[in-house]
Image (cartoon, rainbow, N blue to C red):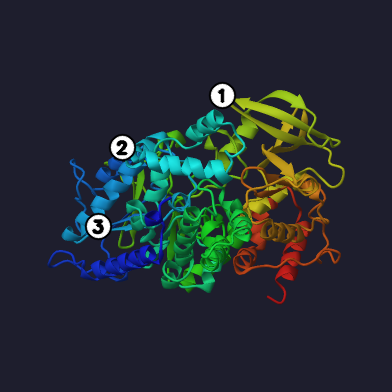
Amino acid sequence: MANSERPTARSQTRVRLLLGSMLGLALLVTPAAGLARATCGQPWSCEGVARIVAIGDVHGALAEYGSILRASGIIDAAGHWAGGETYLVSTGDLIDRGPESAAVIALLRRLEVEAPAAGGRVLVTLGNHELMNLTGDLRYVAAPDYAVEAPRENAAMREAAFAALRTHGDLAALAPDAAQAAFDRKFPPGWFARQLDFSADGDVGRWLLARPLMVRVNGILFTHGGLPPGLMATTLDALNTTGQHQDLLDYTGAWHALIAAGLLDADVDDDARVAQAEERLAAYAGPDRESFATLVATLKRTAASPVHDVAGPLWYRGSAMCYSAYETDTLTGVLGHLAASDVVVGHTITETKRITTRMDGRVTMIDTGMLPDYHGQPSALVIEGNQRSVIYARNPGERAAPEPEARRVGDRPDTLTDDQLELLLAQAAVVADEAPPLPRAGTRLLTLQQGGTKVRALFITAPAAGRWQHEIAAYRLDRLLGIDMVPVTIERTIDGQPGALQFWIEKTVSAAVVERERVRLPRWCSLEPQYNLMRAFDALAGRPARTAENVVIGREDGLARLIDHAGAFPVARRLDASVAKPQVGAELTRRLRSLTAAKLAAALAPWLDRSQQKALLARRDALLANR
């Protein structure tokens, strides 16, 4: 790579100047005479906006993006701004996976220029896929997007890259013909041009690096992934300037400079870059060693920044996935700290492919799988004053309300809710009978079918201790509190024998296996707060100390589920002294305090007698003691 292509402090200064020009533009934007005046104190913080349209993950789906922009009145038939004073907010992931990422960015950049003349504005936050491309992770780039870049990639650029990898890269040990073939497979025409285009000196890179990680409009936060707890240690201004955004700038600058210096290969995985740079620096004795050492130190420092992982707002899925009984506390803390009422996020496709809310409407999830490969639909969230509505491109004349997230413990076919699953378990025919994965006396694993839908369920008739009715009581108590860890469980008589029929969650593994075999699980939701919530539920139910076999964890979502409650619900009113008292946060406290004798009787009377219900309330009081 020629020295002229190396990102320098000058390129980062240009990005900062562009951020400054955005601020100037924000302060100049005014609507037509006679209308309320929207103001932006910073490029990422605006008030008094009459109409907001928020659209989530586009992923290169240009036609679908155009359809929802038209349906929401943002563009006209010719593709130009028609939104008036509307503020269009994009929550990131414009690119990757789909075939027309470059065209999507070009469209949004043009609208960004056109909107201010009408009093409107385009606000774009980075998504994790923009960050991936800015930092050289091109795994999800579609072939057509390489083809767009190919004309800007000359032979000399490819020859220089090939020579570098032949000298000290993966191709060094291969014969010339084999090395060339491997190079051409790994680096299609346009690969290197794209990497440069997404650098701080590249056209797209400069534009993206001037976008914030999060914006606030009318007191509503918009970001790609969610609100991790670490945000309580920063401010919105710092996040978008001196904090994680600066880490991204510093990382990209150091990474490109080290490639140009030959201390990094262009294609080395991000988790191996620091080690490779340190190893090559140790063997380097040239005159630039001190400056290169500074670059390596910068790369190492910024590689550990939360901007790259689930602790940062571009990757965090806690707001969209983790159990609300504890995640609400994190959400409440961050919203209060950042002076916001609620948050709108993309990143996590909703189960129903419709715009969904959770945590009492304070999280709105707008990724509905626009890319056809996701089998979803283009959608837009429209906010006008206190009114919120949803537009779906397939029915542009209709207006829907955001839908509260339905309880859905465990993956199941046809996006069935737990209410629908209860009906299916009660009505479906038994088509197969087998021993459960962990054989237990009085337990069978049944396959049930209704129409084209099949599920499996445990039929529990004679547990080793306690009563099968307690499995149903645990499910009902879980629903009453909104814990959402116990699978759907109903009463059903099969072959003349009554018992508890419990939905079997597929793609799970016991916590014992996770520990024993060191199974790698998704890191979206940490296990420790899940286990604490489990301990709180067990203490309330009076369940004996749980073993790792009684907790199953989803291999694909990392969420813990609770089974085996036959021995729960004793008449003992005290907490089990042999079990450590769990921590009870503010949200769980609120839910526990909402329990009344009348509510318990209505939910649990068929399966627990009065003495058991009174004991449960006494244990609740013990849990909340000293709160």
Identify the mark nearer the N-term, 1 or 3.
Answer: 3
Q: SS for tag 3?
A: loop
- Residue depicted at 40% across the width and 56% down the height: 3
Q: Quadrant of residue 469?
A: top right
For label 1, the SS is loop
CA gap, disc 3 and disc 2? 21 Å
Give the residue at mark 2: 63
Q: On the image, numbered disc 3 is attached to which residue?
A: 86
Residue 211 location, quadrant: bottom left
Q: Position of 140 compared to 5: left or right?
A: right
* Foreground residue among 120 and 429: 120
Q: What element carries label 2?
A: helix
Residue 91 image point, x, y percent = 40, 54
Q: Given this view, does label 1 or label 2 mark the residue nearer the observer?
A: 2
Q: Are marks 3 and 2 in contact (CB under 8 Å)?
A: no
Q: Which residue lies furthest to the bottom in this view?
A: 626
Instruction: Give the foreground label among 3 and 2.
Output: 2
Three-letter amino acid code at disc 1?
Gly
- Please identify the quadrant where the C terminus is shown: bottom right
Q: Which mark is residue 452?
A: 1
Q: What residue type is labelled 3?
A: Thr
> Are there few (<14), some (14-19), or many (20+) residues within 10 Å of tag 1?
few
